[in-house]
Amino acid sequence: MHKVESIEDASKDKKFCGKCKKLIPIEDFHKASRTKDGLRTTCRHCLKVYHSKRYRKQKKIAQATGTCLSMGCYKKIEKGATFCTDHFFIMSARRTLKDVSLAESIKKIAEKQNYICPLTGDTLKAGVNMSLDHIKPISKYPHLIKKISNLQWLSKWANWSKGALSVNMFIKNCTKVFKHVAEKNRNKSKKDNKKR
C-alpha cells in the first residue's frame, strides 16, 4: 500500500493524487476546467490504469453480447466489426483526421460512394473492411489532412497496399505486377506444354 503523504507537503511543482495518494509533479496531471487549480484530481498514470481496466471490462461485455465497444453504446454490430456504424465514423475521424467533428462528413463520403471501393469495386461495410484514404498522401501534403475533397473510402487491403502512393502511382504499380505475373504464367505454361 502507498504511503499517504500530506496534502500540505505539496509544493508549487507537485500535486496530491487522489487515487494513489502520492505527491506527483504537476505536469503528470491532465488539465480540467472545473477544478480550482485547473488540473484533474487524479494523475495520468492512475487514469491510464483506470481506463485500461474499464476498457478490458467493456471489451468482454461487447464480445459476449455482440454490441459496440464504445462505452455506453449497446447497438448490435456486424460480424467482424468492433464498433457500431456511428462510432466507427467517429473513431475514423479521430484517428485519421484528428478531428471528431468531421465524422458526419466522412460518413457522407461513404454514402456518396454507395459503400463501394472506387479502386476494387468491393462492397464496403463500416467497421469491417473499409479504411479512410487520403487521395493525395498526407506524408507529401500534410496541409490536406482534413480536406474533405482529398478523402475517399477504400477497402482495407487496397488502402494498405496503396500506402502513401497517389492513386495513379498505385494503379501503375498494380498494372506492373499484373503484367509481370501474367508473363511469368505464360512462360510457365509454354514450358509445361513443351514437356508433354
Image (cartoon, grey):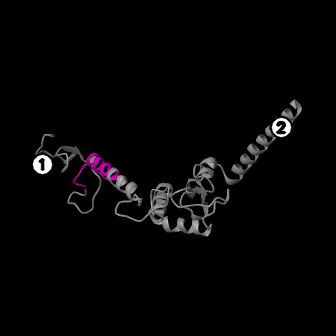
Is there any visible trace of residue 27 in the rendered image?
Answer: no
Residue 15 in the image: above or below residue 114:
above
Mark 2, Cα crowd under 10 Å, few <14 / some 14-19 / many 20+, is few
Task: Write down the quadrant of residue 122 in the picture.
Answer: bottom right
Which sits in the foreground, 63 or 184?
Answer: 63
User: Which residue is pictured at 22% across the width and 60% down the height?
Assistant: 35
Q: Amino acid at mark 1?
A: Ile
- Magenta highlight on residue 53: yes
Locate residue 4, reporting x and y percent: 12, 43
Q: Is residue 109 above or below residue 82?
A: below
Above or below, 154 against 14 in this view is: below
Question: Label 1's element?
Answer: helix
Residue of label 1:
7
Q: Position of residue 43 (x, y in %)?
A: 25, 48
Evaluate whether residue 49 shows in this view: yes
Residues in magenta, as a range: 39-55
| Amino acid type shown at disc 2 | Ser
Q: Position of residue 24 (x, y in %)?
A: 22, 44
| Disc 2 target residue | 189
CA neighbours of label 1 inside 10 A, class few (<14), some (14 to 19), many (20+): some
Say which mark, if any, is on residue 84: none
